[in-house]
Image (cartoon, helix red, strand yellow):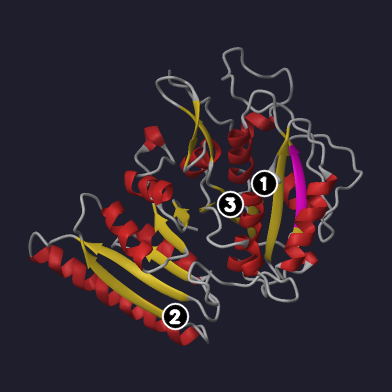
Amino acid sequence: MSMRRSSMPTLEQQRRPAGSQRRNSLPGRLEPVRRPSCTFGTGRPTSAPRTGFLSEKDFLSPFSGAAEVMWIVAMDGSHLSYRCLRLASMLMDVDNASHHILALNISEGGKTNSLLASNTQEEVRKCGVSMQKFAFKTIGQPEKLSVAQTLVAYVNNCSDLKVRLVLGAQGMRYDDITGVPVMDHIGSVAGECMERVKAPVIVVKQPWRELEGQRNPLGRVQRCGRNGKPGLNLFVCVDDSGLSQQAFNVASKMLRPGDSLVALHVRRPPRDSYSQERENKLRDSYTQSCSQLQNTIKGLESCKYIEVPRTNNSIGEDILEFTDVNMADVIIMSSEELGSSRSQQLGSVSLFVAKHAKPHVCIIKHAE
């Protein structure tokens, strides 16, 4: 038994006055939602009345135009959501005044969970992020929309910002044949967000070590990965597409002193001289880009272009094999749209890697 997804409402449908909806309007349209409330820099909800629609204005109002890059972390109080918060704190540019973290909680009634807000604020403080760069917000879930649809609508309407959505991977899905809920590496919320969110989506996996091992004596979260050493190992999958270059640019902005970056290309056997020429240009281009990054970011452990031959049945298997052996912490890759009729859908390689990879996975689908 398969379940159809209702189509996502557009921003124009949200703003349409009550009573002006067409009779044959889609059932998935966004109903009026109470205005999300938050106090920027405190992490506590305000007492302002919650009225109006979910819109860009509602999103921007707490930040007074100060935010340029927004890391939206989906918070539900689970251990994995706190892991998302820690990873976002590691990857964001904490020294850039225009970079902020928004911890976003979705509830049926739009009521703020004060304990969750307090715990989230404390965790961000332990990550070394200034409270002036943090906000906690609760938004109400419309009656006819799922959590995933609400999250997709919210993030996609933040068109004035460079947004990065960070959310946990694991969750529940329903078997297509029996309809029985089963655990999956990629839950229904993460899966739908990867397919339909326009901004880069980072899917966070379970931590590799105990949380106590990731903190220093002062209680601050350490920037370390699977190998237990300081610094993160970032792997960006590259080819000769423009979107692949965008993925490389996003990955380069996540780098900090002590990190390593590998531009990974799975090479297919060249069919003719033209194919070989394209491979050579790709190699020269990314080798030069890696060299420039190495000279620009002081203290970078390494930054190099690596080419591996295709040896498995699929490119996805080659990517998983190489990144697992080399202890990758984050895999960044692009995913082309599959056509206008299936806008913002994932490609098979991206979906395969996101589902089976041990490292966290960042999917890039649009140029910024």
Determine the residue positioned at 83% across, 48% down. 115
Residue at 46% in and 55% down: 361
Is 211 placed above or below 339 here? below
* Residue bearing mark 3: 165
Asked if 85 appears above or below 264 in the picture, the reply is above
Q: What's the CA distance linking mark 1 and mark 2? A: 36 Å
Mark 1 / mark 2, whichever is N-terminal: 1
Q: Amino acid at mark 3?
A: Leu
Q: How many marks?
A: 3
Image quarter for residue 143?
top right
Q: Residues within 10 Å of mark 3 (few under 14, many from 20)?
A: many
Image quarter for residue 286?
bottom left
Q: Which residues are magenta?
A: 135-139
Q: Which residue is mark 2?
A: 293
Mark toward the start of the polypeptide (1 vs 3): 1
Q: Nearer the viewer, mark 1 or mark 2?
A: 1
Q: Nearer the viewer, residue 29 or 73?
A: 73
Comes first in the chain, label 3 or label 2: 3
What residue do we see at 63% from left, 48% from top? 158
Q: Circle 1 sits on which residue?
A: 78
Secondary element under disc 1, as helix, strand or loop, is loop
Q: Residues within 10 Å of mark 1 (few under 14, many from 20)?
A: few
Residue 338 visible in the snapshot: yes
Give the x, y percent position of residue 50.
84, 37
Answer whether residue 136 is magenta in the image.
yes
Q: Which label sits in the foreground, 1 or 3?
A: 1
Q: Residue at x 44, y 26 (%)?
A: 175
Residue 250 image point, x, y percent: 49, 65
